[in-house]
Image: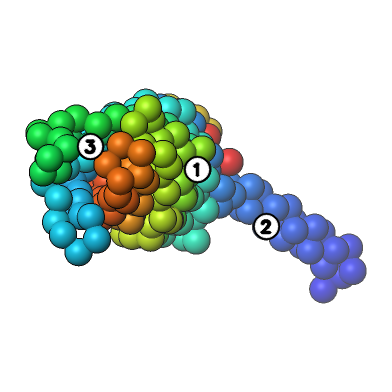
Amino acid sequence: MKPFTCSALMVSSALIGTIAHADDNPWMVRGRVLGVLPDASADLSVGTAALAGNVEIGDQYVPELDITYFFTKNIAAELILAVTPHDVKAVGVTVPGALDNATVDLGDVWLLPPTLTLQYHFDTGTQVKPYFGAGVNATFFFDEDQGSVADGIDYDPSFGGALQVGVDYDLDGEPGGWLLNADIKKVWINTDVTVDFTTALGATVDADVDINPTVVGVGFGYKF
């Protein structure tokens, strides 16, 4: 083979490899608006004695950023990044001689719940691309406000599972480019909460709280 021909083949191979790599860029970024809808419940206690009552945690709507990396055409990992503020109340609280079926304002708290899921994306041969995923969630609580009744409040970090199902709609009709997205997740969040009621009740209340939100998101994305 002549040197010129060999060199031309090498350059052609390099160009083809570069184009293929560009078409197969593994990164996707989305921006969504989330509805975070807690399904909260709690077991309350003072020392070893169970306490009647439950916890209510308010819904919230926030912006979110997520980053997806495709290992193959079908297998991907998604990292979800957002923070959410929530109002918290104790409801139906009964303490003999002090409270009877009372609602107690427990202020508000911010949640940082990064969630990592492993996904399977279906190749439908159309612009509609459904997927499902499962993974893990770590939730950290910060900027706690104990409200007007308690003297202080503390939330332990939470680690739990997550499931999701969603769909991308390819606006460009070809690999890469802009897309619409809709996504639903179920995230399991459990935290131990300690509420200092020394002034009001002369006691500290412990709560084993399940937050377990359903997270509904819609937005736009870009596949590089």
Disc 3: which residue: 90
- Image position, residue 71 (x, y; %): 50, 61
Residue at 82 percent of width and 67 percent of height: 6
**Amino acid bearing label 3:** Ala
Q: Viewer-proximal residue, 169 or 195?
A: 195
Disc 1: which residue: 142
Mark positioned earlier in the residue sequence (3 or 1): 3
Residue at 45 percent of width and 46 percent of height: 141
Dot 2 falls on a residue whose secondary structure is helix
Dot 1 falls on a residue whose secondary structure is strand
- Image position, residue 210 (x, y; %): 24, 50
In the rendered view, tell whether residue 162 sits above or below residue 171.
Answer: below
Mark positioned earlier in the residue sequence (2 or 3): 2
Disc 2: which residue: 17
Q: CA distance from mark 2 to mark 3?
A: 61 Å
Are there few (<14), some (14-19), or many (20+) residues within 10 Å of tag 3?
many
Residue 73 can be seen, yes or no:
no
- Image position, residue 157 (x, y; %): 43, 56
In the rendered view, tell whether residue 25 sits above or below residue 37.
Answer: below
Mark positioned earlier in the residue sequence (1 or 2): 2
Dot 3 falls on a residue whose secondary structure is strand
Are there few (<14), some (14-19), or many (20+) residues within 10 Å of tag 2?
few
**Amino acid bearing label 1:** Phe
Question: What quarter of the picture does the C terminus occupy?
Answer: top right
Single out the mark in the foreground, 2 or 3: 3
Image side of residue 93 versus residue 76, left or right: left
Residue at 16 percent of width and 59 percent of height: 49
Residue 114 can be seen, yes or no:
yes
The way the protein has been coloured in the rendering is rainbow
Which labelled disc corresponds to residue 127?
A: none
**Amino acid bearing label 2:** Gly
Whether residues under marks 2 and 3 lie with C-beta atoms below 8 angstroms apart, the answer is no
